[in-house]
Image (cartoon, rainbow, N blue to C red):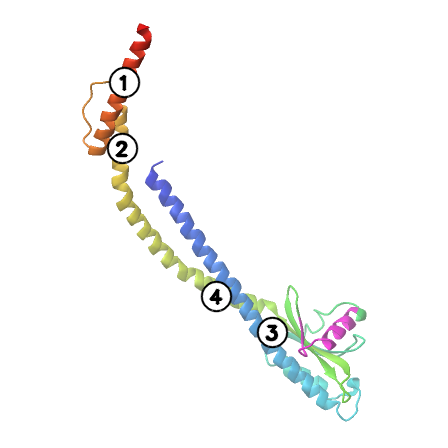
Amino acid sequence: MSLFFKLGAATAAILCFSIALIVLLNYAKFETTLGELQRSRLRVLALDAKASTEAAIDLGLALPAARDAQQILTRVSAMDPDIRGVVILDRRGTVLFQSGLHATTHLPGSARERAVWFEEAAAARDGTWNRTDSTALLVGAPILNPFSQPVGFVLIAYDRRALDARAGVFLHTFARQALWPLACGFTLVCALMWGLLKPLGQRFQAMEKTFRGMEGPAHAAPADEDVRAFDARYQEASQALARAEQSLEGT
């Protein structure tokens, strides 16, 4: 295996690894940014549903008696086809209102666990709560009564497959666009290495041929000046070594 092939393969591997790393890092950054943007949008929808529901109970009605709550959830659910469902829970974790075919799919099975979500949302400092599972982004906001006490929790579930699809399109496009720089860079590196290493390889071959012919005292002088100087020193050292061996044998 030639030196040119080894260096070319190593350079190609480094280029491929570098471009793949750049693509993956940009994909991870894009996916994170896309998720944050979608959470911000869902946060706006959750706060809008929260404000509308609070307006419906401002007259002193209990949350389960708010007639407009179902219409509010239906309106929010229809704003985006990728919203899997919208629900309103009370402080005990009971589902009071829901909209969407998969509205309760992402909720915990027990009311106690759902009540824990309500407590987490009520304690949120920015007024919203969010969580991500394997299939959905969950964003919610606590519903306050006229005395600023949390009495309910509106929760929006967004289909995560929609985000994964957008991120996949970005990855495919970015990777396809990265193939051109990779191909051009590899071709350029191969051309440069061929121009640089070809004379070096020829010189190595000449030196190897010369060194193999330096076994005996009588041989043709090398054409290369540096190799010829090395040959002269080598012959001097060989002759000195031979004289030293003869001197030792004579004693």
Circle nearer the N terminus (3, 1): 3
Circle nearer the N terminus (4, 2): 4
Is 45 drawn above or below residue 227 in the view shown?
Answer: below
| Residue 136 x, y percent position in the rendering | 64, 68
Can you tell which mark lies on residue 170? 4
| Residue 65 x, y percent position in the rendering | 79, 87
Start and end of the magenta stretch? 113-130
Would you identify the image quadrant in which residue 157 lies?
A: bottom right
Residues at circles 1 and 2 in contact by the CB criterion of under 8 Å: no
Identify the amino acid type marked 4. Answer: Phe
Q: Which residue is mark 1?
A: 240
Q: Which residue is mark 2?
A: 205
Circle nearer the N terminus (4, 1): 4
Disc 4 is placed on an element classified as: helix
Q: Nearer the viewer, mark 4 or mark 1?
A: 1
Residue 116 lies in magenta, yes or no? yes
Residue at left offset 60%, top offset 81%:
79
* Residue 45 in sight from this viewpoint: yes
Q: Which residue is mark 3?
A: 39
